[in-house]
Image (cartoon, rainbow, N blue to C red):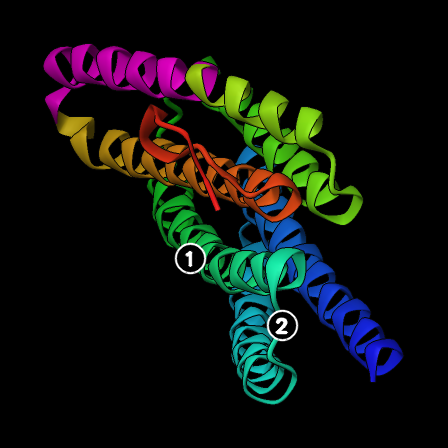
Amino acid sequence: MERHFEVKIEELKRILVLMGAYVEKALEEAVDALLKEDRSRFQKVHDIEKKINDEQLRIDNFCIELLAKQGPVARDLRFIVAVIKINTDLERMGDQCVNIAYSGFDYLQSNVPVESPEIAQMVLDVKAMVKQSLDAFVQGDEAMAQAVMLMDDRVDENKNAVLRRLEEWMKKSPEHIKPALNLISIARSLERLGDHATNIAEDVIFASSGRDIRHGKESRL
């Protein structure tokens, strides 16, 4: 029975990693389409998001079955609880990638270039956060998870810089408000992606050690 449960846990991990790979691909397609001005790639984001949604349902059902039939305790129970929470974050990350695709498409349609170097930096940081949070999950690496959380501050700072820059730009060029608002929407979606990656990092720490470090407080299960 114990060996069977271990096999199931590894299968659950494999499915979650697959879902994470879909999220990484959706993010890559969305931001590359924006930065390389290739509108044809935005459709790929919508296609990938459907796969993310399918995996979310599969993982939820898998976790319910394990909880109902196996009665996990201690570390195994923490792992399954963490997977349920990570599953939700990954699905919402897929939604944010779709939001970037919608706003990016509208922005490129306007043919009005807006200077916002902070968005390019946000893209680099958020892609790194997503990858490292998933790597931390696979490896059970608390130090890597902590590093992800530290990166979130820079993403927030760059988002605020985008808002300041584009607010000034809209004052000077009110006829171009719509493309600026599209970029602001993209910056906010990137920030939320970073927040979800941070949530995953917190869940990695919880699954590994039982420490709950949400909201700047710490408790232990």
Q: Is residue 93 magenta?
A: no
Which secondary structure class fits the magenta region best?
helix
- Residue sitting at x 57%, y 57%: 78
- Closer to us: 215 or 104: 215
Label 1, secondary structure: give it.
helix
Q: Looking at the rendered structure, which numbered label has been put on residue 72?
A: 2
144 sits to left or right of 26: right
**The magenta stretch spans which residues?**
154-174
- Closer to us: 126 or 119: 126
Q: Quadrant of residue 159?
A: top left
Kindly tell me whether residue 168 is visible in this rendering.
yes
Of label 2 and label 1, which has the lower sequence position?
Answer: 2
Question: Quick one: quadrant of the N terminus?
Answer: bottom right
Disc 2 residue crowd, few under 14, some 14–19, many 20+, Cα 10 Å: some
12 sits to left or right of 95: right
Task: Please identify, in this view, whether the residue under mark 2 or under mark 1 is nearer the observer.
Answer: 2
Q: Give coordinates of residue 98: x percent, y percent.
A: 44, 57
Q: Quadrant of residue 32?
A: top right
- Residue sitting at x 67%, y 64%: 16
Q: Give coordinates of residue 31: x percent, y percent.
A: 56, 40
Q: Give coordinates of residue 77: x percent, y percent.
A: 59, 64
Amino acid type assigned to the residue bearing label 2 in the image: Pro
- Residue sitting at x 52%, y 62%: 81
142 sits to left or right of 171: right
Instruction: Give the answer, above or below, for where 51 lies relative to 111.
Output: below
Badges 2 and 1: C-beta atoms under 8 Å apart?
Answer: no
State the separation of the CA atoms marked 2 and 1. 27 Å
- Residue sitting at x 61%, y 48%: 207
Instruction: Give the answer, above or below, for where 152 lies relative to 88.
Output: above
Residue with the mark numbered 1: 92
Amino acid type assigned to the residue bearing label 1 in the image: Arg
